[in-house]
Image: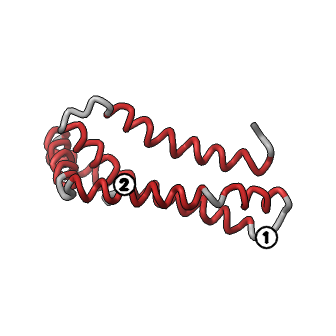
Amino acid sequence: MLSNQETNEITGILGEEKVRLIRAASVERERQRYSDDELWEWFLKLESRKVEIMETIPYYNKLISEGYEDSGVWRFNRDRLATEYNAAKPLMDCLIWHLEQRGDPTIDNWRTGWDDNYYRSMLGWCRKPWGIE
């Protein structure tokens, strides 16, 4: 990853339009690295992991409210899912791109649903231990 200074120097040498085209080509190459099947397999695996982690929430909410040390495990699971989500963003963007190429009419729902579902889950996790509704 280039620093801001390096990016500015490159932009100064090549010009903004060429830098934009290089970035677009890089994104396009990344998108086409994965087949639809690979993306769906990955997506289903991530969803399964999310469900697995979220199933632990009621148990760990109880531990947190009672002040048990084991609540650290719950926080670890929450943080692990957040890390996996952030790492998954480029792949999810690829999946959305593949759906757009097929003319999928639900593409906006996919894009907002992916983010909304994640953030709603995180917000729920943050509220429950302290009884905030």
The spot of residue 102 in percent (x, y) is 18, 37
73 lies left or right of 33 = right
Give coordinates of residue 71: x percent, y percent. 74, 65
Q: Nearer the viewer, residue 123 or 9?
A: 123
Q: In the image, which disc is placed on residue 31?
A: none
Kindly give the residue lying farthest to the right in the view shown: 66
Helix, strand or loop for disc 2: helix
| Residue at 21% in and 55% down | 30
Q: Secondary structure at mark 1?
A: loop
Q: Amino acid at mark 1?
A: Glu
Residue at image position (25%, 51%) is: 9
Q: Few, some or many C-alpha atoms within 10 Å of disc 1 (few <14, some 14-19, many ≥20)?
A: few
Q: Which residue is mark 2?
A: 43
Q: Nearer the viewer, residue 11 or 23?
A: 23
Marks 1 and 2, how far apart in space?
Answer: 33 Å
Say left or right for 116 vs 123.
left
User: Which sits earlier in the primary sequence, circle 1 or circle 2?
Assistant: 2
Mark 2 neighbour class, 10 Å CA radius: few under 14, some 14 to 19, many 20 or more:
some
Amino acid at the residue labelled 2: Phe
| 132 or 52, nearer to the observer | 52
Looking at this view, name the residue that lies furthest to the top: 105
Residue topped by disc 1: 69
Q: Is residue 100 left or right of residue 111?
A: left
Residue at 51 percent across and 56 percent down: it is 50
